[in-house]
Image (cartoon, grey):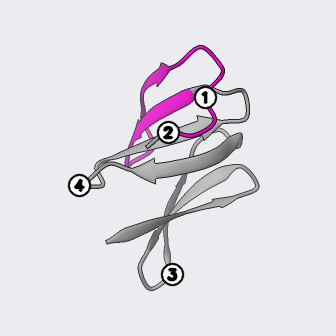
Amino acid sequence: MNILQIKSGKVEIRKDNGSLVRTIGNGDAVSADFNSDQSLVAITTVKGKVEIRKENGSLVRTIGNGDATNAR
């Protein structure tokens, strides 16, 4: 089971012992959450857009019109 941490706008995926797996995103994240099997990450940006990314960091799609405050 992994956890998400946001540091300086970057989303860090960490193991439950705290070790870093990888850093994803463009540096403008305000919130992030996994889907149920932790294969996708929903990242809400400072511009109000939601990015759906694979756990390896590759962008699947960007959704929203710029007024999102959080996505799960």
Give the number of the disc on residue 71: 2
What residue is disc 4 on?
37
What residue is disc 1 on?
68
Give the number of the disc on residue 18: 3
In this rendering, which labeled residue sits more in front, label 4 or label 1?
1
User: Quick one: SS at disc 4?
Assistant: loop
The amino acid on which the numbered mark 2 sits, given as a three-letter code, is Ala
Q: Compared to 62, does 5 lie above or below? A: below
Identify the residue at horizontal 53%, vertical 18% (top origin).
64
Q: Compared to 27, does 62 lie above or below? A: above
Q: Position of residue 43 (x, y in %)?
A: 53, 41
Residues at marks 4 and 2 touching, judged by CB atoms closer than 8 Å: no
Name the image quarter holding the N terminus.
bottom left
Q: Earlier in the sequence, mark 4 or mark 2?
A: 4
Identify the residue at horizontal 59%, vertical 13% (top origin).
65
The amino acid on which the numbered mark 3 sits, given as a three-letter code, is Gly
The amino acid on which the numbered mark 4 sits, given as a three-letter code, is Asp
Q: CA distance from mark 4 to mark 3?
A: 19 Å
